[in-house]
DNA sequence: ACTTCCAGGTTGAAGCGTCAACCATTCGCT
DNA sequence: AGCGAATGGTTGACGCTTCAACCTGGAAGT
């Protein structure tokens, strides 16, 4: 068993270990903040945020699942809980009666608006405000390169904008 | 409710969305590869790897939990499964009879040695080989900055070296 | 129209992580 | 010594994600 493995150099190793730690801790930290402040998981929030940006605050389950990087069964379970909490409703698509349309309720909308600021604050506290503007650009380029392997079909590229709710409220000409 | 929230700029937003996508996809990708090639979760591998580097291939459960960023109950469950599969054994510490020592078996050692190359290969394919040497250094600095907030006590800093098993055998001069 | 196949969703069971409760051992104080 | 508190670990129940099975509705071929 001759060892042809290309091991990592010391520099590569250190960078990798740190990235691995970030990838491990960051999702947990976001989950924790949202759980505490909004009684929701990160994924729950993502679902509501996605709907809040969609035309008529409505999306098909399959599209919603793809854009949140979830399997359909997972989304189905999550949507059932969010529906039970009054944040969204599910209706049959009369155009294609196989499909289900998820629509954000007014209460769901208020939930997103109420939750977004603290979420953005956490993102700033944990990441953005700790980096220089140059590092933000470097991070963007690095993450893009890595996503080329992780997400070749770019399903997550139009990920939740963490957008200012005040302007998503009425006008989304795009 | 005047909105004092400091929203993200377009550049910050894009970088953040991409980092979020990486943090979401990378752990799943590593899990998937290890599950497929070694019938283990990423965390399982981490536990075995940690033990493989320790003196006498032995660590206390509490120390092992801390260095793998896990709660003690989680590690206890995982160790029970790994013990059932013959990869490690648990014995009482006769020095402090409250403590439990986890020791990697020969079979566990062989498992790590057999698994490491494909794992490192995946790390290269997904991350390291997609970045320039400059980007590797930038990534290191960025991740370090973020870890300042995520892991202030540096519990994960001595994370698994993904080290060449052939030299973990005897010498690690640093 | 009728059959066949595929896409869209939902459901229920199984596996893993988290939390709270619990037991054993050691440490600190008197 | 002896008591109370704290440390180290394990266990069992609950919640969430995954996987396979299933059902419905549309599309394609004849």
Image (cartoon, coloured by chain):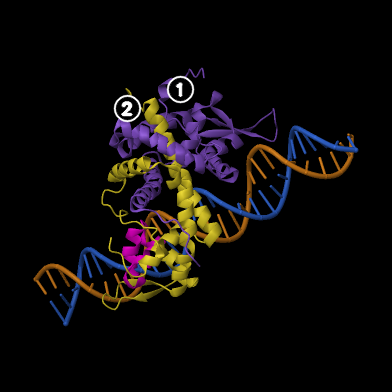
Chain colours: A purple, B yellow, C orange, D blue
User: Does residue B62 belong to the magenta stretch?
Assistant: yes
- For label 1, the residue is A168
Vertical order, A98 against C24 (above or below): above
Instruction: Give the prevailing secondary structure in the magenta stretch.
Output: helix
Residue name at image x 43 percent, y 67 percent: B79
Numbered range of the magenta stretch: B50-74
Share a chain, discs 1 and 2?
A: no
Q: Position of residue B158 (x, y in %)?
A: 31, 56
User: Does residue A67 belong to the magenta stretch?
Assistant: no
Q: Nearer the viewer, residue B95 or B160?
A: B160
- Where disc 2 sits, the SS reads loop
Task: Tell me, yes or no, if residue B39 can be seen here.
Answer: no
The span from disc 1 to disc 2 (Cα, nearest Å) is: 16 Å
- Where disc 1 sits, the SS reads helix
Q: Nearer the viewer, residue B123 or B147?
A: B123
Question: Quadrant of the rendered structure where residue A145 is?
Answer: top left
Horizontal placement of C27 versus A93: left or right? left
């Amino acid at each position: 068993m001759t060892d042809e493995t290309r091991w990592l150099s010391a520099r590569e190793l250190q960078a990798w270990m740190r990235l691995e730690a970030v990838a491990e801790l960051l999702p947990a930290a976001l989950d924790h903040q949202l759980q505490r402040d909004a009684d929701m998981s990160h994924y729950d929030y993502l679902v509501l945020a996605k709907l809040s940006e969609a035309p008529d605050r409505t999306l098909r389950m399959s599209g919603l699942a793809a854009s949140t990087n979830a399997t359909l069964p997972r989304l189905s379970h999550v949507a059932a809980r969010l529906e039970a909490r009054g944040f969204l409703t599910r209706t049959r698509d009369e155009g294609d009666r196989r499909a289900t349309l998820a629509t954000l309720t007014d209460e769901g909308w208020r939930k997103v608006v109420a939750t977004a600021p603290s979420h953005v604050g956490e993102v700033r506290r944990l990441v953005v405000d700790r980096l220089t503007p140059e590092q933000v650009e470097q991070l963007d380029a690095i993450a893009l390169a890595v996503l080329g392997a992780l997400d070749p079909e770019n399903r997550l590229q139009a990920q939740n904008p963490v957008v200012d709710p005040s302007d998503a409220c009425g006008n989304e000409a795009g």
